[in-house]
Image: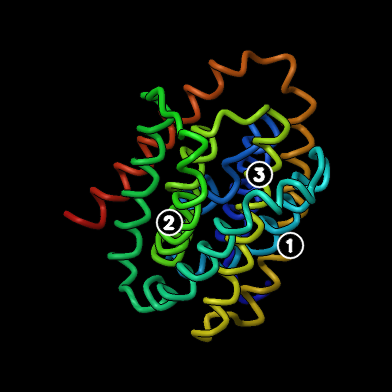
Amino acid sequence: MTDLPLLIVAAMALTFLLAGFVKGMIGLGLPTVAMGLLGLVMPPAEAAVILIVPSLVTNLWQLAFGPGLGATIERFWPMMLGITLGTWAGAGLLAGASSGQAAAALGGALALYALAGLVKLPLRVPPQAESWLSPLVGVATGVVTAATGVFVIPAVPYLQALELERDRLIQALGLSFTVSTLALAAGLAQHGLFDGTLAWGSLASLLPALAGMALGQSLRRRVRAEVFRRCFFLGLLALGLFLMREHLG
């Protein structure tokens, strides 16, 4: 941590406090917010390394408190396998891209995710399609994860389209994010992107992430969820468009 400028350390702490708060409020968004904000002050590949520990711990927390973890794993293991294979196949994308290209791709992923959340298309996956669609969605999510460090497209819209009961949905999201985090960590390690400074930065970011998540959970019942979601997606859209403009211009 001593090798990181003080401004970067402060930005990391505030980023993960906010990202944890968002996750505590709506059950998702920590990696998306963290990658988007950190992408303003460092290359996305480095931001992805710092993301690993806070993302993994908070997603395991989310995963542990859902109903019937075994049943969730049994239902969604083909999707999880697809995520792993897709991330492995595209492992060099984030590492090999230039900083500008990776940041622009990150901005595009954030904007697409925000638009999907704002439009709220009435998507529904027929039960008979799940067996073949889940692995394909997993592979696509893995490739996007490998290219941008963001693992919400298309996994989140797909899981929402399955019309799962709320607690089951949050647990399925936690499972998907956990597998994506582990697969991303393996891909980054494979390309030698971990170093001691970034690893310590990732570990140190856990505390503000957990504090933000606890705060978000405590306020969840006091704030209208729909208003918060809309503000979240509008902010994410603005951030994504900004990153694209800065790095494609």
Residue type at mark 2?
Answer: Leu
Label 3 sits on residue: 172
Q: In the displayed structure, does residue 42 sit left or right of residue 58?
A: left
Residue that appears at 40% across and 78% down: 92
Residue that appears at 61% across and 52% down: 176
Q: Is residue 84 above or below residue 177?
A: below
Label 2 sits on residue: 136
Q: Nearer the viewer, mark 2 or mark 1?
A: 2
- Evaluate whether residue 46 shows in this view: yes
Between the C-alphas of marks 2 and 1, the distance is: 35 Å
Q: Secondary structure at mark 2?
A: helix
Q: Is residue 209 above or below residue 148?
A: above
Corner quadrant of residue 237: top left
Mark 2: give few (<14), some (14-19) or many (20+) Cα within 10 Å.
Answer: some
Between the C-alphas of marks 1 and 3, the distance is: 27 Å
Residue that appears at 49% across and 40% down: 128
Q: Which residue is outermost to the front?
A: 128
Q: In the displayed structure, does residue 88 sit left or right of residue 2?
A: left
Q: Residue 173 at what x, y percent from top left?
A: 62, 44
Whichever of labels 2 and 1 marks the residue nearer the N terminus, that label is 2
